[in-house]
């Protein structure tokens, strides 16, 4: 038989409709979001190679009368400087709208050129339509670099200015490869008020389409073989494409075009080897304690049945790794949220993608994982850094305290006490937006730590209100004070400032509208 083109591909995004499967719910989510004329901010997040970029390409190809879409990859090889990023984005927009190519010099000489000069011309061209900007790999940007010319922060600030403006004609759809809480605060602040959507593994129906359709009429899969591919890849589009690509190559070499379970198994090693770089990337992104958990779950005694939390703790004890129970108990659910693990009805944890488990067994050892923990200081995980941070905080060495709390969190991102003290340090340094973000995150955990976080959050919002008042932004200041009082009804500063605001409003209303209109405001001031 003549050589046949392999229709499966692992790595490049699916740019054509006939290579894209499933995701109807995500596309409907976008349609629903764009139906509101006041909604202009959407965020997709999810693990690497889960298909986020493929979704953007499908959105960009849709013929929609309400908007024009422009795709821009922030990892496309241009430099990290704000001028180059704005110029690259302008070129992408101009190319999609068939406008004249913009001049780079305009962006180099004036960073405001994008929104003061370029966008108004775009609005004229669009008429009543909106512009949907599809911004891929937003989290790769480097902010606050040593070289000011390579600092992308002004680019982020420009986008934030457009997002917060009253003109909602530009819609932003950002894609990031990690959870929102893991972003630097300068990037995170741009997503306030965003509609967010995690891009998950494919469901079974879409996965079966991805297996069957590309090779239809050439390669025939036995039903058991398809079920086995599903069991190995768990609906991960990259690993499904990767395994099917190797199955097709194998069929071509053998000139045997019917696939059985044995053929699927025979292709696994080649698929794992071909996906080595993606798997190494995944391993680099998980914390050291997460690596220990994943290595433990990869062992033969847990293959098939998974492991309970008590079994994971027993494995920790048997291997002499001193990870506190509360830290170890938090990790599996965190990995479930990221779809690295799955949890069954018995609360047993196993791998979401079996191919990943096999790669860990093949590529890593207990000695390697435990020695990494010991070398990093996780023998007493993160505690030394945490205690050093507390000591520095009490001595008013706030920069040193921040460094130590961040080190503790780099070892274990779920170290809630360290994050609470990080928030307190941010507050003491008057990094108020960052403090608000951190306290808000900690509050979700419940219990005593949440109660402490609420009090800290009330302080941060009250102080941020003072800052807004100093900037003549009384309306937003009032909102911050009201939120502070909701968190802590006895908060002295917030209540005092609200009383002053109500009295000023009452006096203004008294002169313009009379006593009856002003009376409720005076009553509020006296509460």
Image (cartoon, rainbow, N blue to C red):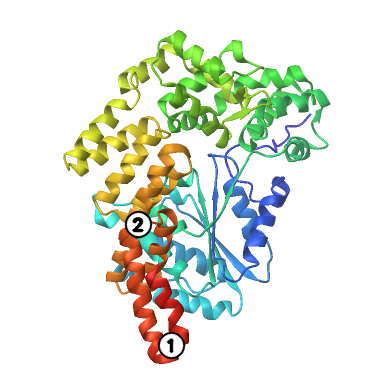
Expressed as whole percent of the image width and height from the top left, the position of residue 353 reads 62, 28
Q: Which mark is residue 491?
A: 2
Q: Is residue 469 left or right of residue 215?
A: left
- Residue drawn at x 59%, y 54% is 56
Given residues 110 and 488, the one toward you in this image is 488
- Residue drawn at x 41%, y 25% is 288
Expressed as whole percent of the image width and height from the top left, the position of residue 323 reads 40, 20
Which quadrant holds the C terminus? bottom left
**Mark 2 or mark 1, earlier in chain:** 2
Is disc 2 surrounded by few (<14), some (14 to 19) or many (20+) residues within 10 Å?
A: some
Given residues 404 and 394, the one toward you in this image is 394
Q: Is residue 202 left or right of residue 279?
A: right
Alpha carbon separation for disc pair 2 and 1:
29 Å
For label 1, the residue is 515
Q: Which mark is residue 228?
A: none
Expressed as whole percent of the image width and height from the top left, the position of residue 5 reads 70, 37
- 264 up-or-down from 141: above or below: above
Given residues 470 and 228, the one toward you in this image is 470
Image quadrant in which you'd find residue 451: top left
Which quadrant holds the N terminus? top right
- 394 up-or-down from 131: above or below: above
* Residue lying at the far top of the rendered structure: 318
- Looking at the rendered image, the disc whose residue lies closer to the viewer, 2 or 1, is 1
Is disc 1 surrounded by few (<14), some (14 to 19) or many (20+) residues within 10 Å?
A: some
Expressed as whole percent of the image width and height from the top left, the position of residue 163 reads 47, 66
Given residues 208 and 493, the one toward you in this image is 493
Q: Secondary structure at mark 2?
A: loop
């Amino acid at each position: 038989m003549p050589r046949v083109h392999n229709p499966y591909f692992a790595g490049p995004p699916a740019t054509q409709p006939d290579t894209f499967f499933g995701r109807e719910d995500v596309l409907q989510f976008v349609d629903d979001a764009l139906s509101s004329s006041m909604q202009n901010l959407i965020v997709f997040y999810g693990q690497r190679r889960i298909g986020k970029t493929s979704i953007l390409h499908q959105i960009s190809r849709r013929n929609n009368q309400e908007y024009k879409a422009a795709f821009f990859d922030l990892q496309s090889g241009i430099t990290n400087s704000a001028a180059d990023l704005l110029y690259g984005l302008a070129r992408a927009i101009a190319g999609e709208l068939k406008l004249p190519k913009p001049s780079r010099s305009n962006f180099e000489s004036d960073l405001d050129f994008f929104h003061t000069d370029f966008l108004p011309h775009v609005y004229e061209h669009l008429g009543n339509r909106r512009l949907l900007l599809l911004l891929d790999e937003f989290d790769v940007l480097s902010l606050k670099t040593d070289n000011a010319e390579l600092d992308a922060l002004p680019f982020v600030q420009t986008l934030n200015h457009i997002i917060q403006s009253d003109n909602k004609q530009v819609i932003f759809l950002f894609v990031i490869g990690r959870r929102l809480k893991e972003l630097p605060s300068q990037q995170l602040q741009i997503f306030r008020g965003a509609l967010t959507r995690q891009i998950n593994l494919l469901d079974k129906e879409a996965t079966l389409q991805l297996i069957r359709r590309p090779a239809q009429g050439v390669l025939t899969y036995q039903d058991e073989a398809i079920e086995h591919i599903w069991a190995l890849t768990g609906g991960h589009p990259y690993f499904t494409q990767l395994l099917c690509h190797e199955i097709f190559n194998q069929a071509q070499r053998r000139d045997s075009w019917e696939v059985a379970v044995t053929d699927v198994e025979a292709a696994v090693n080649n698929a794992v080897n071909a996906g080595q770089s993606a798997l190494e990337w995944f391993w680099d992104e998980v914390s050291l304690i997460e690596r220990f958990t994943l290595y433990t779950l990869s062992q033969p005694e847990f293959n098939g049945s998974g492991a309970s939390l008590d079994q994971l703790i027993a494995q920790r004890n048997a291997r002499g790794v001193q990870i506190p129970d509360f830290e170890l108990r938090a990790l599996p659910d965190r990995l479930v949220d990221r779809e690295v693990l799955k949890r069954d009805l018995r609360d047993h944890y196993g791998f979401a993608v079996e191919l990943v488990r096999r790669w860990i067994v093949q590529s890593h050892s207990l000695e390697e994982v435990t020695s990494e923990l010991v070398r990093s200081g996780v023998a007493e995980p993160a505690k030394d850094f945490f205690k050093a941070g507390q000591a520095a905080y009490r001595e008013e060495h706030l920069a040193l305290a921040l460094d130590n709390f961040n080190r503790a969190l780099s070892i274990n991102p779920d170290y809630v006490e360290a994050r609470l003290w990080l928030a307190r340090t941010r507050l003491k340094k008057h990094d108020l937006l960052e403090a608000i973000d951190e306290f808000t995150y900690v509050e979700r955990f419940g219990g005593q730590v949440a109660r402490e976080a609420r009090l800290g959050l009330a302080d941060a919002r009250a102080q941020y209100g003072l800052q807004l008042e100093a900037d003549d932004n009384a309306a937003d200041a009032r909102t911050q004070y009201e939120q502070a009082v909701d968190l802590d009804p006895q908060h002295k500063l917030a209540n005092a400032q609200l009383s002053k605001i109500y009295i000023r409003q009452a006096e203004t209303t008294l002169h313009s509208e009379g006593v009856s209109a002003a009376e409720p405001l005076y009553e509020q001031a006296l509460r």
